Structures are given as structure tokens and as C-alpha cells.
Amino acid sequence: CPWGHYCPLGSASPTACAPGSENKARQQSNLTDCQACTAGFTCPNSSTVKATRLCDPGFFCPGADIVSTMKCPAGSYCAGGDPAPVQCAPGTYQNTTGQTECKACPAGSYCELGQATPQSCPAGFYCPPQTTYPTEFPCPNGTFSARLELKNVSQCT
């Protein structure tokens, strides 16, 4: 019985494994020998021996995927070949689905892990670009500001 197929006992010819599955072994006899396509890949054709087509950029493929259909959610990115979305790192964000990278957090805001929207810098603190948490940059001793979204230390008075 060839790779990418299974041959039930008594069958005259091999049966191809369905799209979304793969079979890396020969002489298999059961449908269950066709394994789910490897996570991070797609298996669009029947008789796939080994998954070689990476999941498309902007999508993730958790396994058994025929084509890339699961769009990467906001707060994450999918560069291509991803089995799951990758959360945006602290100091970055992504407000759009299906993206391949995250955006730098703008000045006056902070962005924690997996953030979809930058958050306003709180009173008493300033937030330069790529600030990772709200209290990362306190106004120096003897200064303060009740305003939100300070962008640099010179705005602390």
C-alpha cells in the first residue's frame, strides 16, 4: 500500500487519505492511519504523504487544515506557518485581524502583552513609544501632572 493511502483488508486498490490529512507510512490498513495535517501547515490534496505547504501569512492552522481559513485575531500576528496566533509583545499592539506583525505602541500610551488597542498613559506617569505597562515611567520626584497621555518627561511639571 503506497504512502498517502490506506488499504483495508481485502481491498483491490488503495484508498487515498482525504485532504486535511497525511500518511507518512506504507502498508497502512485503516482510515485512522491517515493523521490530521500537521499544525502550521495545510494539506489541500488527497494522498498527502507529508505536509509541506506552510499556513498562509495572516492566518494560523491548528491542524487538519485543507486551506488557511483561520484569520489571525487582533492583539496578535501570524507571520506564516503558525499553528496558533502569536500574541503581540509588550510595547506593541495590533488592532486589525489577519496581520503578519504588530505595531509599535505610540507615545502617550502603553501596550501590554496581546494588546489590540493602546491604553492611555495614567496621570503621574509619562509613556514614550513602546511603553510596556502603565507605571513604567513615573514623573520624577517633585513633579506631577494630572493630565493623561504624557509623552515625555518634560511634560511632568
Image (cartoon, helix red, strand yellow):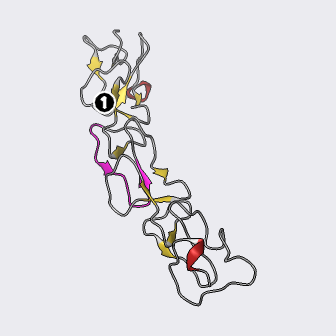
Q: Residue furthest bottom?
A: 146
Residue found 43% across the figure and 69% down from its top: 117
Say which of 23 and 114 sits in front.
114
Left or right for 90, reference 37: right
Left or right for 19, reference 89: left
Q: Is 74 placed above or below 67 here?
A: below
List the residue tagged with mark 1: 43
Residue found 46% across the figure and 46% down from its top: 84
What segment is highlighted magenta in the picture? 66-77
Left or right for 28, reference 5: right
In the rendered image, residue 134, in percent from the top left (x then y), is placed at 61, 73
Magenta highlight on residue 88: no
Residue found 39% across the figure and 26% down from its top: 34
In the rendered image, residue 16, in percent from the top left (x then y), is placed at 27, 21
Say which of 78 and 105 sits in front.
105
Q: Name the magenta segment's main secondary structure.
A: loop
In the rendered image, residue 10, in percent from the top left (x then y), is placed at 33, 13
Residue found 43% across the figure and 31% down from its top: 38
Q: How many marks?
A: 1
